[in-house]
Image (cartoon, rainbow, N blue to C red):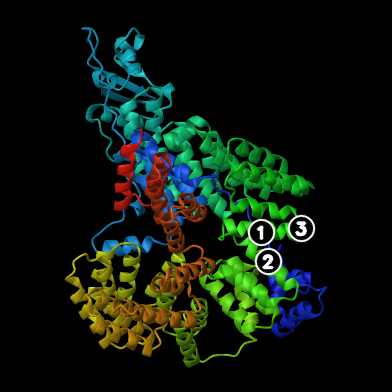
Amino acid sequence: MRTFYPSDSCSKESHLNSLNPQSWLQVERGKLSSSASSSAESFIKVPEPQILPHYKPLDYVEVLAQIHEELESCSLEDRSSLYLLQYQVFRGLGETKLGQRSLRSAWQESTTVHEKVVFGSWLRYEKQGEEVIAELLSSCGKYSEEFVPLDIASYLPVTSPEAASVKVKRHISRNVVFKIEQERIACDRRKIASLSAPFHAMLYGSFTESLLDEIDMSENHVSPSAMRVVRDFSVANVLIGVSKNLLIEVLVFANKFCCESLKNACDRELASLVSSMECAVELMDFALEESSPILAASCLQVFLYELPESLTDERVVEALTRVNRSQVSTMAGKASFSLYSCLTEVSMRLDPRSDRTLAFLEKVIDFAENDQQRVLGFHRLGCTRLLRKEYREAEEAFETAFNLGHVYSATGLARIGYIQGHKLWGYEKLTSVISSVSPPLGWMYQERSLYCEGDKKLEDLEKATELDPTLTYPYMYRAVKLMSEQNAEAALEEINRILGFKLALECLEIRFCLYLGMDDYEAALRDIQAALTLCPDYRMFDGKVAARQLRTLVYEHVESWTTADCWMQLYEKWSNVDDIGSLSVIYQMLEADACKGVLYFRQSLLLLRLKCPEAAMRSLQLAREHASSDHERLVYEGWILYDTGHCEEGLQKAKESIRIKRSFEAYFLQAYALAESSLDPSSSSTVVSLLEDALKCPSDRLRKGQALNNLGSVYVDCEKLDLAADCYINALKVRHTRAHQGLARVHFLRNDKAAAYEEMTRLIEKAQNNASAYEKRSEYCDRELAKSDLEMVTRLDPLRVYPYRYRAAVLMDSRKEKEAIEELSRAIAFKADLHLLHLRAAFHEHNGDVSSALRDCRAALSVDPNHQEMLELHSRVNSHEP
């Protein structure tokens, strides 16, 4: 795929370590600039877009709406499986947080212990790294249930002893002695008979044993100790202090003689003893052999609780794959499909090519109950078979998924055709798909571009970007092609188009290569350090080289900075709203600086601005780990809690920190959390007081600028415009560039629209990331200028939804209803956004299209089930439905 080496030997990391960085980089530079024939494509190869192993319906809005409609009327037993399907849709859309919410709903709506175990463990896996949140919540007296293993026995009903009606014949003794080898165990005949129908028949029926006072049990493979446990249970109906091995023996005996209450009691007791992986591995086979559902579920919970590590244990994998339908039913009940879906998800992330993944996928297909479940199973099976180069089997799987209605599986069929030398067939397959779908989707044109060359390829890639600007492959291909034509500036401009709104690692890698070929080592270093911030273990060139090693090589070719230089660079880049540049400087500072807690905290703020919430949370946790004092640690804990929706607990941490020591960050956190969460207008004065306290504490200009900016916002909300203007002007004096936006708002509220426009223009000129500035400026100008600014916003960041809504509203005002709906649909095709769906639903309602309005309402409520305006619109539209 991607190569960047002067010779094959350089692809080995051991050889890379021994290379002289200067000579290595010189060789690469020479390779790029020697002649037109030695193009950039000789060392930068763009990988083919991955066939995603996800459920990707043609119209995700329709599917989400159908799921929501079914949830409104289905039985309680079906709700968790519907939420699982919703998770799969959001997974295909790349909406991680929405997917996690669906899993949480599946867990909350579970009606069986097996569903609780599977979805609880799956949710825990999806949120790995967030265990610290549960720990912090517990320190505030609040508990997060999904991180706590389930007490399985308490969720299952206790089997009552059989109340056998015993008519006692006069000659039958009340007691009976069971002889086992040389020992005799005296029992109450009536009590033993009540354990099961077979015992009742033996002791009171027409069998010879009913006439005997002593019965020899030596041939029944039961020890005297086990028989004494049976006797005691028959009297007390409870097991007390019985060892594991004895419980195993008694359970086997109970199965043999159909003693359900005794078996159930043994099952529960054994389940309570499962406390480690070793114990779970040991007892799972026994549980399945003896059909002990409680014990099997307890062992399963241990396996799942330790994901993903447990799937590297061959004994666990064998226990989960070498099982028949009956055994799976014992282990997972009605959650069998959910179980293997979970295991497949984890296994594919570990190694999608593995035999383990293949075995789990086959189970997914075995336990699929409807076409949507079968689609996911067969499509994923096709992806795994393709990676394993098992082309015939992959083709069969993709064909099955495609025939079941999963059009996206055509990508797999086309790739296999291409691999087998049928490039034209691949092109025609995608052409057929495009012509049969209205409207077509971006991935269709992206895929078809793989099977043509020249202008046709570029046309398809342009169309792919037009329909779905989030696809990274078209930008990367165009950038490398431009570089091969010796047009370096145009190549950078192309790759910057996507990096301006989507910080994709593969795009940073391409830009790193472009800069390296242009001898711009500082820019190359910036990008590789940004990549390492996002993914510390990132490997480049198709996984062949650790990014850290390349960073070491490039670092030798840039000027070293002192700590003071780094802080000056950070101040400069932060002021210019150069978020990637700021990330890179912080990475460099973390390599040497002692104040790691402060730096990781700054890193988290940048990552949030760059829409990388998972990486931001990782940085916040690192800030906590490296805090230099208790009061500093409490601030970072407060931010962790606040950012995960636990505002009250975040405020509690801020107050604890202030009690130890008054600090800027503690007051700032308290003010920020209170301003964002309180609905009480009187809280504004408290927020002002807190921010003023923060500004009295020592801090650097970057943070003080932010506090002044926030204080200005509070004053604006309180209509104290003069005080607000003072705050914004003071923030600008310390180069807090975003304060231009606040000052523009003040000008606007003073009825000086022209001054507001000019203020935003200053921000646009200064900020490197300025899509939001164009969007805000559009509010301070006439319609034509606003349209121009919003077109620029869409070019810079097509994921910002306000421009689409504005343009659609203008079209609707002009009575161009069809065009208005098309404008919204253009964005909805690649972004599941509540506001876009809400507005489109309102337009459909206005046009009298009740079914389309209801569809959009239901899909929007899948995105946010508690949005009040959406709930009201849904209720109104629903009342009009025939």
Disc 1 versus disc 3: distance between alpha carbons?
Answer: 11 Å
Q: Is residue 219 above or below residue 805?
A: above
- Count neighbours of disc 1 (C-alpha within 10 A) and say few if under 14, some if 14 to 19, many if 20 or more: many
Q: Amino acid at mark 2?
A: Arg
Give the number of the disc on residue 461.
Answer: 1
- Give the quadrant of the C terminus: top left
Which circle's residue, 2 or 3, is located before the other in the chain? 3
Q: Residue 285: x, y in percent?
A: 48, 38
Q: Where residue 607 appears, x then y in whole percent?
A: 45, 71
Q: Are marks 2 and 3 in contact (CB under 8 Å)?
A: no
Q: CA distance from mark 2 to mark 3?
A: 13 Å
Kindly check if marks 2 and 1 are in contact, taking CB atoms under 8 A apart as contact: yes
Residue neighbourhood size for the residue with mark 2, other residues' Cα within 10 Å, grouped as few (<14), some (14–19), many (≥20): some
Q: Amino acid at mark 1?
A: Leu
The kind of residue on which mark 3 rests is: Glu
Q: Secondary structure at mark 2?
A: helix
Q: Residue 120: x and y, percent?
A: 39, 48
Which residue position is annotated with label 2?
478
Q: Residues within 10 Å of mark 3 (few under 14, many from 20)?
A: few
* Sequence-earlier tag: 2 or 1: 1
* Left or right: 752, with 555 as reference point: left
Determine the CA span between mark 2 and mark 1: 8 Å
Nearest to N terminus: mark 1 or mark 3 = 3
SS under mark 1:
helix
In the drawing, does residue 515 fall left or right of residue 806? right
Residue to which mark 3 is pinned: 453
In the rendered image, the quadrant that contains the N terminus is bottom right
Q: Quadrant of residue 135?
A: bottom left
- Front residue of 810/664: it is 810
